[in-house]
Amino acid sequence: MVVLKLSGEDLTEKVGAGVPDSLASAFEKPTGQTSNDELWIKSSRVADVASFLKSDTGLDFNFLNSISAVDYINHFEVVYHLTSMNKEHTAIIKTRLDGREELSLPSVYHLWRGADFQEREIWDLMGISFTGHPNMKRIMLWEGFDGHPLRKDYL
Amino acid sequence: MPIQTEPMTVNIGPQHPSTHGVFRLRVTFDGEEILEVEPIFGYLHRGTEKLAEERNYTQIVTLTDRLDYVSSMINNQAYCLAVEELAGVEVPQRAKYLRTLTAELQRVASHLMGIGFFLQDLGTLGTPLMYAFRSREKILDLFEMLCGARITVSYMRPGGVFFDAPEDFWPALEQFLEDFETEYAEIEQLILENEIVMVRTRGVSILPLDMAINASVSGPVLRASGSDWDWRKKAPYDAYDRMEFDVPTATGGDNYDRFWVRIQEIHQSIRIVKQCIEQIEPGPTRANVPLIIRPKPGAEAYGRVEASKGELAFYLVSDGGISPYRMKVRSPSLINLTVTEHLLVGWKLADMIVTLGSLDINMGEVDR
């Protein structure tokens, strides 16, 4: 059986009902396109939505594939790829952080241990910190390194 | 009367033969028993993701070789799948078969390394490792016939493969398969029911299934804990939807099971290679893709394969330019290390080295 990709609409319906006031409208990309592959959520509600996605019996996302961050100069996008090994479906969850200084997101470490190194990596290379992570320090570079190299303004 | 010992903190690595690269563990011991572990890495950090933002889509293939340098073919494959999804390229049938075939040969080579070094870590002085290398060398020779390189192959390209296989590749491959059967039987006979291997690895460093899933562990390490999750089955890419193979699983989740799953996977890979030889048909090996690829602005792709170490994925974001706006590598070796602490605490120094061997990590991929 082939794994099913849940669309943004499916997810919007379920998450909207399960976690009130958590959805964000799909932001337009700098290039002016939107797509229906992902669910957009408010950055302050990441942990609540993640908790719902994991515990809801219909969604049952027990596996966190990866967390990625993308720098769009005036805002950052953080992307969560999730898989449910029991229900055999996948989802993409996105959130957006405005500005460039003192960015932070709620950590999902306590839901998925797999977030441990990935959140630390995003802090190290992109400069987004995760509140609630027990060991939020650099991972690839050394403590005292100046700047976050994967940002677009780091040359 | 218990002996009062003081905890002692020791650095294992970064230069240490058993750490498979430059990898450091800061370990606190009580005598020989491990109390605390902290993995420290980044010594091989080359900024692959940043470098990719400066190169065009075809050039990046060479960067992917250098991630997990013992399974470059599979890295190429994951990256090419992501670019093809991004640019909407359809790959010709023959190229799909060639990719599946070479990826499986590479999996055999990578698992042979994994098994060989695992036994080396157990204290066998070279013999099983050399047995494994003997077969691996022949696979590398085959790769050399295909593309002129042995390790950093760059054989796959967005849209297919670089060249069709030369005519003398096919008899050489048949010869390899014939030799490998006896060579591998020898390796299995030597190690599979070896009493010392059993005693040293059974029941050591157990990883329960719920913890493995929660910590995003993938690949043979996950399957040794009881899951049958394999992306080749769950979301088939290239020619895997036409292949018949089993997914070996074990339920113990200990060092022996991780090692055993790799041994069994080699059999399945050889099965796939044989099916590829039977089914492959003449045809073009590369779609008509320009050298400079310009995907649509705002396009995104998540190219995912079951690599020899686990789920390898490339997350690509395009802004319409000639190079990706962002390339993120989801590397299985890094994420499998999440469970290091759980696996090691409470065990002895000598088990630590073996457990690291059973995870089969590759530092090129951990640090990127």
Image (cartoon, coloured by chain):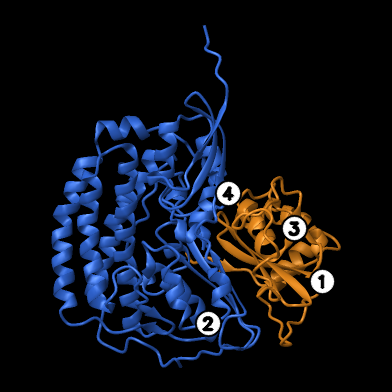
Chain colours: A orange, B blue
Where B280 sits versus B258, above or below? below
Report helix, strand or loop for mark 3. Answer: strand
Query: Can you tell which mark lies on residue A111?
Result: none
Name the side, left or right, on which B31 lies relative to B120.
right
| Label 2 in the same subunit as label 3 | no
Q: In which quarter of the image is residue A36?
A: bottom right
Disc assigned to residue A129? 3
- Position above or below: A114 against B95: above
Q: Earlier in the sequence, mark 2 or mark 4?
A: 2
Where disc 1 sits, the SS reads strand
Marks 3 and 1, how far apart in space?
14 Å
Q: Which residue is drawn at 34% across and 74% down?
A: B99
Which image quarter: residue B350?
top left
Label drawn at residue B55: 2
The chain carrying label 4 is: B
Disc 2 versus disc 4: nearer the observer: 2
Look at label 4 and name its amino acid: Ala
User: How far is mark 1 from mark 4, CA to CA?
Assistant: 29 Å
